[in-house]
Image (spheres, rainbow, N blue to C red):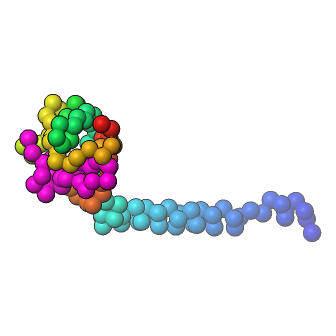
């Protein structure tokens, strides 16, 4: 037996590894393309970025100080344990459908401590707290 021939014989290893890698790459590409075509990944909508100030004048007043304009139908104001107002239930007033910087929303919710402005995504049931403060 020749030891030199035994150590240098690597003919079968390289083609097998090459075929396995090509099959794996093909499967991964097919999965990625299929996910895009079928829309499995979906799209994630970003919550608006804005800053707010809060005041208590026989109900909570939230003033949009700056940032993105926000659709009022997607806003809910919550204070402490009180139930929220908003999300198109007709309780928000003092503005049209777009809440711009410098405008104030009035809510009939009474102050129980901390106040949150909650935004609901129009394309899903996801919600985000986009502003909070205390009075």
Q: Is residue 54 magenta?
A: no
Write the residue at 8% across / 41% down. Answer: 94
Whether residue 122 sits left or right of residue 113 in the image: it is left
- Locate residue 132: give its quadrant: top left
- Locate residue 31: give its quadrant: bottom left
Percent of width and height locating residue 74: 19, 51
Quadrant for the N terminus, please. Answer: bottom right
Q: Nearer the viewer, residue 42 or 87?
A: 87
Write the residue at 34% across / 65% down. Answer: 40
Percent of width and height locating residue 129: 32, 47
Say how many tags the image has: 0
Quadrant for the C terminus, please. Answer: top left
Write the residue at 47% across / 67% down. Answer: 27
Percent of width and height locating residue 117: 27, 45
- Work out whether 114 lies above or below 16: above
Whether residue 10 sits left or right of residue 57 in the image: it is right
Is residue 69 visible in this depiction of the protein?
no
Is residue 92 visible in this depiction of the protein?
yes
Percent of width and height locating residue 122: 21, 55
Write the residue at 25% across / 33% down. Answer: 53
Whether residue 70 sits left or right of residue 2 in the image: it is left
Q: Nearer the viewer, residue 14 or 56?
A: 56
Q: Nearer the viewer, residue 55 or 125?
A: 55
Residue most toward the right? 1
Q: Is residue 77 magenta?
A: yes
- Work out whether 61 lies above or below 118: above
- Work out whether 133 lies above or below 89: above
Magenta residues, start to end: 72-94
């Amino acid at each position: 037996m020749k030891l030199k021939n035994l150590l240098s014989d690597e003919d079968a290893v390289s083609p097998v590894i090459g075929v396995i890698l090509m099959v794996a790459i093909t499967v991964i590409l097919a999965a990625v393309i299929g996910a895009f075509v079928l829309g499995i990944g979906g799209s994630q909508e970003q919550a608006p970025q804005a800053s707010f100030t809060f005041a208590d004048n026989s109900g909570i007043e939230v003033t949009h100080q700056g940032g993105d304009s926000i659709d009022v139908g997607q806003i809910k104001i919550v204070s402490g344990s009180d139930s929220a107002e908003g999300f198109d239930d007709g309780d928000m007033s003092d503005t049209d459908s777009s809440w711009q910087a410098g405008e104030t929303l009035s809510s009939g919710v009474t102050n129980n401590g901390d106040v949150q402005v909650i935004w609901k995504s129009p394309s899903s049931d996801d919600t985000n707290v986009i502003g909070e403060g205390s009075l």
